[in-house]
């Protein structure tokens, strides 16, 4: 497994527009980018909200279940989500 990883997913916004998102792990921290249909380049999401972190965790969780990633990635995202959520507790 390489230390730099890219995980992508699509979501449909409230306005009905489908957007692509990309979670990028660079061996130290997660970065999230977004691609709008009219754009050609990925734009970084400066302050991802809780829903984006949960979407990325869902993608990582499914890859972990298929034995494509180690559990440490799920744990790291759980910590980020718990900090943003304020509860300190995450569930599957």
Image (spheres, rainbow, N blue to C red):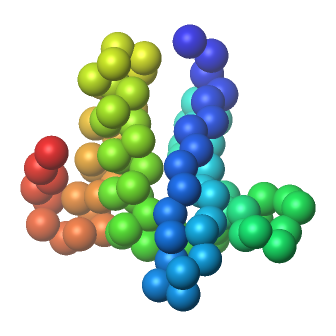
Residue 78 seen by the camera = yes
Question: Does any portion of residue 31 appear in the rendered image?
Answer: no
Tell me which residue sits at (19%, 70%) in the image: 86
Q: Quadrant of the C terminus?
A: top left
4, above or below 47, in the image:
above
Which residue is drawn at the image coordinates 60% and 68% (left, top)? 18
Residue 49 screen position, x and y as percent: 43, 72
Give residue 8's position: percent from left, percent from top.
Answer: 58, 44
| Residue 47 place in picture, x, y as percent | 55, 72
Q: Nearer the viewer, residue 76 or 58?
A: 58
* Residue beneath the point at 50% across and 63% down: 11
Task: Name the residue furthest bottom.
Answer: 15
Residue at screen point 31% across, 35% down = 61
* Residue 23 falls left or right of residue 64: right
Residue 67 in picture, x, y percent from top left: 35, 14
Q: Is residue 74 above or below residue 71?
A: below
Q: Splitting the image into 4 quarters, where does residue 53 fall?
A: bottom left
Instruction: Judge by depth and name the residue closer to the eye, 73 or 65.
Output: 65
Q: Is residue 46 above or below residue 28?
A: below
Q: How many marks?
A: 0
- Location of the N terminus by quadrant is top right
Examine the rendered structure and indicate whether residue 50 appears above or below residue 24: below
Q: Quadrant of residue 50?
A: bottom left
Q: Which residue reaches farthest front?
A: 16
């Amino acid at each position: 497994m390489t230390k730099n990883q890219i995980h992508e997913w699509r979501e449909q916004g409230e306005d009905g527009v489908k957007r692509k998102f990309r979670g990028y792990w660079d061996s130290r921290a997660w970065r999230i980018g977004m691609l709008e249909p009219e754009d050609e380049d990925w734009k970084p999401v400066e302050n991802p909200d809780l829903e984006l972190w949960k979407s990325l965790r869902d993608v990582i969780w499914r890859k972990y279940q298929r034995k494509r990633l180690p559990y440490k990635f799920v744990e790291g995202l759980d910590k980020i989500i718990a900090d943003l959520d304020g509860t300190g507790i995450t569930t599957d």
